[in-house]
Image: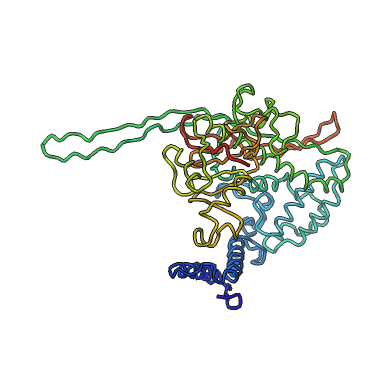
Amino acid sequence: MSNHDLDLSSPDKARKALADLVSEQKRLKALNRDLSENMEKKTADLKKIHQRISEIEAGSGAYNGSRGDGNLAQYVRRDGTVRLKGESNDEHAYMPGLLDDKPKSDWQKAFQDSVDDYNMVKAIRRNGDAPKARARMLDLARTAPVEVSKAFVDVAGSGGDFIPDVMLPQLERNLTLSRRVAAAFETVPMADKTVILPFLNTGFRPYKRNVVTTDDAAQFTSSSMSTTSRTITATGFSVRAQIDADASEDSILAVLPLTRQELIAAIVDGEEDAILNGDAVDLSSHGDAIASWNIRGRWGASGLGTSSDHRRCWTGLRNRALDITGASSAISEDLAGVLSLRSLLDSPHGVEGDCILVTSPEMYIKHLLNLDEVQTLDKFGANYTALSGQLAALAGMPIIVSEFMGADMNTSGRYDGSTTDKTGIICVNRSRWKIGQRAGSTVEMDKDITRSVFDLVASSREIFYSVDAATKKNVSYGIDIST
């Protein structure tokens, strides 16, 4: 196989080329031949195959506009009018609208952004006018795909009156898409702020079926379930930004992308930090010295450890593992050492994919990528780390790299501000942990007339909790690992 005759014109041919390359290595190994034979050419082929397969996978579910905008027809009602905002009726459950649904085309996304900007600027401006934002919105409306163009006929003189007040829908969507660690856990809706969570201690038990040998045979042995419950209360996060009420339209439009980006980053980072490092106890009993812990410089020097510190919303994975003696400092730098973390877990250990590894960048780069078992083509296949520079999973456990797995821990796996040269890795059965969400992320804006500013507040009401009893070992923590 050479670059000249490498046929990657279809997904099947690309995968066959990869299989042929692996088979050739196996053939050489069986013949006790040098596996590095023609390695330069094989490596070049492998890179080309890997790139092609990545392109295929990346494009398989993406909508790039080349297939038309036929999906927009779903927003057209039976009477031919267009549903701009989501609604329910007697015939259907909730149906999303053109403006608040996940974009199906580049035009829909651009139009949603323009409506979002228009509503925001109009709300902030003293005179309620946003001519530049309105002009951009109307220009996009005039280029609407045929499926929804009826909604925008003759809009030139109507200003923005036909546009409903849809505030920052893309911020909420981008927030969901940006989640890393949180995305690994199931989100469960909560009907109220506080709910009672029942969980099973022991279930029904099977018994041997008795053989009928008499007229009055013995009854089958019965069993019962043992259950208990726990109270779950949603807390969550809020982030506040301020915009000057006297700002010009141009300056407001310029700052909106950065404001959205920072609101999303703050909630995502706070949620991830709490999932990994949270401890729902008083500051005096907190496992870490959070009053001085500004992990990777993310949170600044003020307000740390106060009653509103996001790390006090709930008990996170790391502190849960330490509380239930699920931490181990005996993690050796090989696959067996990493697997020993899984062996610390109580049953159920989960089916493939239930257990995940959450690691710091230092642990990932210095230790996991250097495991002997993943470094070579013959041991790990086409995605061996010496070529790809990445490791998506290990022994069936997906790997998530998080900046909020600290590299400034002590030998006990905690932050004390004194010994700050250790890191760690978490193994968790994600099927035993949930994110309870009282309400989806919301964005609200109101004017503070005492300061002549607009407060923009993004909130997320949720709780991270385990479905197991408090003593159940459903998470383990590898500690005392050199950075």
Residue at 73% across, 61% down: 144
Q: Residue 354 in the image: x percent, y percent? A: 48, 45
Q: Is residue 164 left or right of residue 197?
A: right
Query: Which quadrant would residue 420 be assigned to in this image?
Result: top right
Q: Position of residue 107 (x, y in %)?
A: 72, 59
Residue visible at 73% across and 44% down in the picture: 167
- In-front residue for pair 290/70: 290
Vertical comparison of 325 with 259: above or below: above
Coordinates of residue 158 in the picture (x, y in percent):
81, 53
Q: Which corner quadrant of the image does residue 217 belong to? A: top left
Left or right, 136 with reference to 37: right
In the image: residue 476, left or right of residue 416: left
Residue found at the far bottom of this picture: 5
Q: How is the image coloured?
A: rainbow
Depicted 393 relative to depicted 464: above or below: below
Which of the image's four quarters has the N terminus? bottom right
Please tell me which residue lies in front, 81 or 416: 416
Q: How many marks?
A: 0
Residue 402 in the image: state x and y as whole percent.
63, 44
Would residue 264 appear left or right of 30 to someone viewing this image? right
Asked if 43 appears above or below 262 in the picture, the reply is below
Q: Which residue lies furthest to the left in this view?
A: 214
Viewport quadrant of the C terminus: top right
Q: Residue at x 56, y 29 (%)?
A: 194
